[in-house]
Image (cartoon, coloured by chain):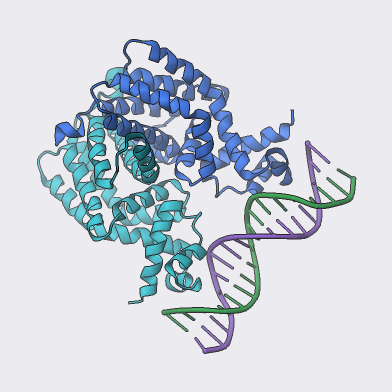
Chain colours: A cyan, B blue, C purple, D green
Amino acid sequence: MSNTKEKIMNAAEVLFAEQGFSETSMRLITSVAQVNLAAVNYHFGSKKDLIQAVIDRYFIRFSGRVHIAFTDLEDNESVEMTEILEALLIPVIELDETNTDSAANFMRLLGRAYTESQGHLKVFLSEKYGYLLSQFTRLVHKANPDLDNNEVFWRLHFMLGTMVFAMAGHQALKDIAEADLNETVDTQRMIDYLIPFLTGSMQSQTSMEIN
Amino acid sequence: MSNTKEKIMNAAEVLFAEQGFSETSMRLITSVAQVNLAAVNYHFGSKKDLIQAVIDRYFIRFSGRVHIAFTDLEDNESVEMTEILEALLIPVIELDETNTDSAANFMRLLGRAYTESQGHLKVFLSEKYGYLLSQFTRLVHKANPDLDNNEVFWRLHFMLGTMVFAMAGHQALKDIAEADLNETVDTQRMIDYLIPFLTGSMQSQTSMEIN
DNA sequence: GTCTATAATGGGATAGAC
DNA sequence: GTCTATCCCATTATAGAC
């Protein structure tokens, strides 16, 4: 209905991704969105609620598809790491079809959510979407039955860290890549490099085998 | 000389690592350090300068040793990824010998530096310590002569991201690990899991081979 | 070198008119 | 729903006494 609410969210998601949550003031958001300052509090209640709404909008867009793909994989007899990663990343990439750069924006927001100390956000996300992380954990374990629990746990979180960090630092990486390699970078290209990197890391020797 | 300066830096490094730079006020720092609020501006000039001083103190402690180890490896005929990672990570771990938790603190600070939009900090670090990144890049290339430039570039930054993120999220990971696995985690243990993960990721098939 | 007091700014939130 | 005006708070930074 109210187009003001959407204008605020559209402006906020870009600014949050670029500068982080606490560095982005409501005054800046409303001026970019060309709406009145008081509109944020009227429509969302508080800045915290705006942050949650922005991130939740992304989760709503793709979590259903990831859940379906994960459930399919859980029903299969065996699973490859590549399949799991694609089930997760393809719906993210396809966010770009409706909205340019929205995949990169989303991942940067996730990175911010992970690293900025926004306690309310972590609680909100783990309560609402923790089931996706559980599915992901079970699938990774299924794809790597030889690894013990500890090894799976750590590699899984390293993987998540790599993904989130790569996307959160997307802009910095893009700048460096273009300077160093004369290569223009889009999100798809980056993910093409990322997937083999991650599958390789899961297939490496365990720390036990090395010690 | 002035013990006040050190009290400020010691308090600031912990608070910055825990909460980030912009979320940590000078009022909090000086109250934890039990010094007067005005002392930060007197001794450092500004909050920005304090941030740089805190991070630079860490770099000064370990950059010399990493540089020597890297230079040794550059003189060798061939290099293994494990050697490169150890040359980088062992001096970091050994920070803990003089000061408990300082390795984890340092990596968390690095993560903050990478993700928070503190432009001045990125400029400062790349001007003063960019030569270490160049050495690291050359070594990774030497250890993986079959990979083309692009592939090395991307994997290198994914690796840095994984390392920094793992350490930056150290506390969160520690908490989850203890809840999920009943395993007590210290920095050394985490790095034992991290190194094979990273070496594996560098040895994976390239994106070209898969496509 | 340390302290108090205060300036100057910018933040989130809200009351109340329209 | 939207706007102006304003409150109240926290921040960094600094002037000036000791």
Q: Residue at x 70, y 43 (%)?
A: B41
Asked whether the viewer can see residue A76, the reply is: yes
Q: Residue at x 48, y 47 (%)?
A: B117
Quick one: quadrant of the C terminus of chain B?
top left
Tell me the quarter of the picture where residue A204 sits. top left
- Tell me residue A60's x, y (percent): 28, 60
Rendered view: D18 above or below A5:
above
Please state the total of marks drawn on the protein image.
0
Apparent side of residue A167 relative to residue B33 in the rendered image (left or right): left
Q: Residue at x 31, y 34 (%)?
A: B154
- In terms of depth relative to the viewer, which is nearer, B149 or B38? B149
Q: Residue at x 43, y 37 (%)?
A: B170
Rendered view: A174 above or below A109:
above
Apparent side of residue A3 relative to residue A21 in the rendered image (left or right): left
- Tell me residue A119's x, y (percent): 46, 52
Apparent side of residue A160 relative to residue B93 in the rendered image (left or right): left
- In terms of depth relative to the viewer, which is nearer, A196 or B150? B150
